[in-house]
Image: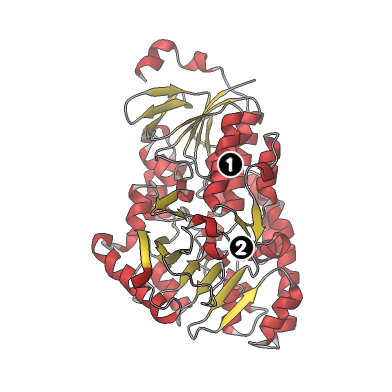
Amino acid sequence: MSKKIVVIGSGFGGLSAALRLQAAGHEVHLLEKRDKLGGRAYVYEQNGFHFDGGPTVVTAPYMFDDLFVAAGKKRSDYVEFVPCDPFYRIYNHDKRYFDYNGDTNFILEQIEKWNPADKQNYLNFVQGIKDIFETGMALIDQPFLKVSDMMKVVPDLVRLQSYKSVYSYVSQFIEDDFLRQCFSFHPLLIGGNPFDSTSIYALIHYLEREWGVWYAMGGTGAIVAGIGRAFEELGGKITLNAEVKEIRVRKKRAVGVEMADGEFISADSVVSNADVAYTYLNMIDKRHRSFRNSNFRYKRLTKYSMSLFVIYFGTKKRYLDSGLRHHNIILGKRYKALLHDIFNKKHLPDDFSLYLHMPTITDPSIAPEGHENFYVLSPVPHLGSGTDWRVAAKPYRDKIMQFLEDNYLPDLQENIVAEHYIDPAHFSGTLNSYLGSAFSVQPVLTQSAWFRPHNASEDIEDLYFVGAGTHPGAGLPGVLSSGRIAADLIDLGEQQPLEQVLNPEVAAIA
C-alpha cells in the first residue's frame, strides 16, 4: 500500500531512505532546512571554488550502486567514481610518511621502511580483521530493535574481542607505534576514539582493502546532486529552506510535522535524518517519550563524538610538487594524550592532528583554472568543553594555517583567495547536532547495535531514524545502510490508515 512519507533532512541517510521509498511506490516529501541538499555533505561555493562540506572518503561504492539499482537507475549515469591511490598518505610529526592502498605487497614495502618485523605481523592482523569484517558487514543492514537481536550476536562479539579497543586490537599484532597509529585511526572517521571504540571498527581497514577508497568527480556534492535528481525523476518532492519545528504525535503515532512557519504536513510515516538526540530533545514533546528516549538519557547517559574545526581554502598557487596526496593525515607528536584531551577531558589542546584534503590533485574542475582546492580538519572537543568559539576560532585557525605554511604549503597565506571555516558552534546551530558533536552518538560498545538509538522509535509508531546517530552508525556505509533499514521497516510494517487517527478538523489545527 502506498504511503505518504515525510523525510526530515537530506544527509545521505535521508537521501538513501527517500530514494528507496519513492522507488517502492510511496509518496515521499523530503524537507531540508538549508538552501541545498546534503546535510553535512553541503557544498560551499566561493570565488569559483566548490568545497565539499563534509564526507570526502568514499568507501564501499557498491552501496551507492545498490541504491541507484533500487531506483531502477545506473549510478554511473549520475556520478563518476575514480579510485584514490594511495588511499592516504599518513605523516608523523617528523614529516616521514606511510602510504597505503589495497595492494598487500605495496603495504609490506611501506612497512619495511618502518619496522621489517611488522610485515608478518601485518599479515596476521589482516587475517584477524577479515573475520571481523565478514561478521560485521553481515549485520550492517540488519535492525537491532529487540534484546534478542543483540543476544544472537553476543557469541560473535566475544569471539571477535569486541571488548577491546581498536588500538588495543591493532597493538596485539603491530609493534611499531607509528604503524599502530596508521592502522588504528579509522574510528576517527566516524567520530570515535581509537582508544575507546570497540575493535569491531577495525573492519574499516579491511573494508578499504576490499573495495578501495574513491572520489566522486565534482566532489561529494555530485553524489548528493545525483541522488536528488534520481529522486525527483521518480516523482519525489523536495522542499528547501524548510525547517521542521515539531514531529506531531497522536495516539502514540507520528502523524506529520509542524514547520517553523506553522504549516502542518501530514504523513503516514516520518523519517528523521536530523540528529537523533536533537530530534528527541527538541522535536518531540516529552510526554510522548519513555525513559529510553528521555532528556536524562540524551543529556546525562549518552556519550557523544568529538566535534570538528574545518577550514576550507583555495589558493591561486598550485602545490602539485608539495608531496601531498589527495587524502593526507598529519599526526602530531602526541596521539593517545591528544585524543584523551579531546574525548575524555573535553579540553581544547594547544596541539593538533590534521586531515588535509587536496581534491584538485584528482579533479581540477572544482577550482578555477590554475588554482588549488583544500580543506583541513582538526578534531576538537564538542561544546561540553565550554570553549567559546567566538573567541577561540580565529587564533585556532591562525595556528593551523601557520603550521601548514611552515611545514607543507610554502607561502600559503599570501596565496589564499577563498576561505571559510566551521567550528562546533556551526554543528550545533546550523546542523542541529546536540553539543555540536560532528558524528552524533559516539561509537563505543555500549552504544552500538541494540544499545544505539534504534531505527524505529520504541515510543512512537511510524517514526523512523536514519543517519549517524542511529544504527549502524556514522560514515557513508553506515548512514546509507540506515536508510535502507528504515525503508525496509516501513515497507514491512503494518499501519492504521492515517484518517482513522487524524481527522481533517484536527489536521487543520495540529
Residue 324 visible (yes or no)? yes
Q: Position of residue 66 (x, y in %)?
A: 70, 43
> Local crowd at mark 2 within 10 Å, few (<14), some, or many (≥20)?
many
Residue at the limit of the structure toward the front, as seen here: 369
- CB of mark 2 within 8 Å of CB of mark 1? no
Residue at the limit of the structure toward the left, as seen here: 391
Viewed as shown, does residue 501 lie left or right of 286? right
Q: Nearer the viewer, residue 416 or 334?
A: 416
Identify residue for label 2.
201
Residue drawn at the location 37% of the way across and 29% of the way down: 259
Q: Position of residue 188 (x, y in %)?
A: 52, 65
**SS class of the residue under badge 1?**
helix
Identify residue for label 1.
226
Above or below 277: residue 18: above
Q: Earlier in the sequence, mark 2 or mark 1?
A: 2
Residue drawn at the location 53% of the way across and 77% of the way down: 321
Q: Label 1 is placed on what type of residue?
A: Gly
Q: In this figure, what is the number of numbered marks? A: 2
